[in-house]
Every structure is written in structure tokens, then in C-alpha cells.
Image (tube, rainbow, N blue to C red):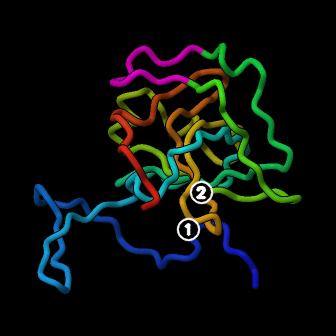
Amino acid sequence: MERQTSYSARMPRRIERPITVPLAAAVRSNGEIGVLAHHGFGSFDIKVMYYIAGRVVRLEWVDPHIMLDLEVEPGLMVPPDIWSIQMPRDAEIAMSIPDDLVPLTIGPRPETWELTMPSLDRARKIGLDREAVEPGRMIAGVGYRGCDAQDNEFRCDLLLIDRKAYALRPFALPPETCV
């Protein structure tokens, strides 16, 4: 069986429409009301922070958040000078690259990873423009892999382009994920 490498490739395309009510909720079969979420941290493992780098092969510059596919080559290593990259001063929360940053490990052939990125509003606020992440560009990121080891999903906290860091996450992490 061939392993699918893109969340988007597995899911049927749907038209994204803005939610026009303050809160979207669902009634479960037991009558409880639950809040709907889209790519929250619940589906990403925040116990280990990873380094990812590669060539952008697909970009969706849309809300509710930007998505891109990154082709990652085997043998990825954390650059020894990564800790000298200046962190964004305009970040709402203190962002840093941990001392125990781990390179994302992949198989013997290049793999495509889907990166969950910020909303268009957040991208504008931090000065990230579409041209910086167009297909063909080499980028790197620091963040978390998905909870399901079969899926190549990655949630980027810091985006690194030409030694410039962009703080993609404007809020504190939840206490736990993958539950």
C-alpha cells in the first residue's frame, strides 16, 4: 500500500467560507455541545520540538490558515549556527529555539511534509508575504510533528527564511496534546 504524504491529497476539496457567527458549535450524539476546532494543537505532539527544512513544492495562501508542502531530503541536520538567528522582537510571547532541538528524521528518500502555517491576518501582522514561501523557495522551520506517525504533518512555530525568523504562534502552548 502506498503511503499518502499530504493531508490535502487525502481529503476532498471543499470551499472555505468564513464563519459569520462568533462561535461554531456542534451537538454530539449524547446531547453535549462541543466547539469545533481546525488544526488545533490537539493533533500535534508538543513534547519534542523539531527542525525541518526543504523546498516548498505547494502553497495554499488561504484562510483559515496557510498550508504548504515541503520536500524534505534525508539526512536533515540542525545547522550549528541556528541559535544565532535573532528572534522576532514583535512576538506576543517569547519565542526561542530550544537547546535540545531535534532534526526531523525521515526515510531513505525525500518526503513531502504538510506544514500548518498561520492565518493570512497573522502572516500580514508578522510581515510574512506570499513571495517568501512560493514553490521553489528553500525554507526551514521549528515546531511539532503530528501525533499520527503515519501522517507527514508539521505545525511550524518559527519559520526561518534567509536567516530571518517569523513567529507564527502568538499564544502559549496548551498543557498537553495527543490525548
Q: Position of residue 167 (x, y in %)?
A: 46, 29
The residue drawn where x is 61% and y is 30% is: 160
Q: Is residue 28 magenta?
A: no
Label 1: few (<14), some or many (≥20) within 10 Å? some
Question: Could you tell whether 36 is left or right of 111 in the image?
Answer: left
Looking at the image, tell me whether mark 1 or mark 2 is earlier in sequence order. Answer: 1
- The total of numbered circles placed on residues is 2
What range of the chain is rendered magenta? Answer: 86-96
For residue 27, which quarter of the picture? bottom left
In the rendered view of the protein, which quadrant contains the N terminus? bottom right
Q: The residue tagged with tag 2: helix, strand or loop?
A: strand
Q: Mark 1 points at which residue?
A: 7
Res 42 quadrant in image: bottom left
Mark 2 is on which residue type? Glu
Label 2 crowding class (10 Å Cα cut-off): few <14, some 14-19, many 20+?
many
Residue contact at pointers 1 and 2, CB within 8 angstroms: yes
Disc 2: which residue: 114
Residue 123, given in percent of the width and then of the height, sits at: 41, 36
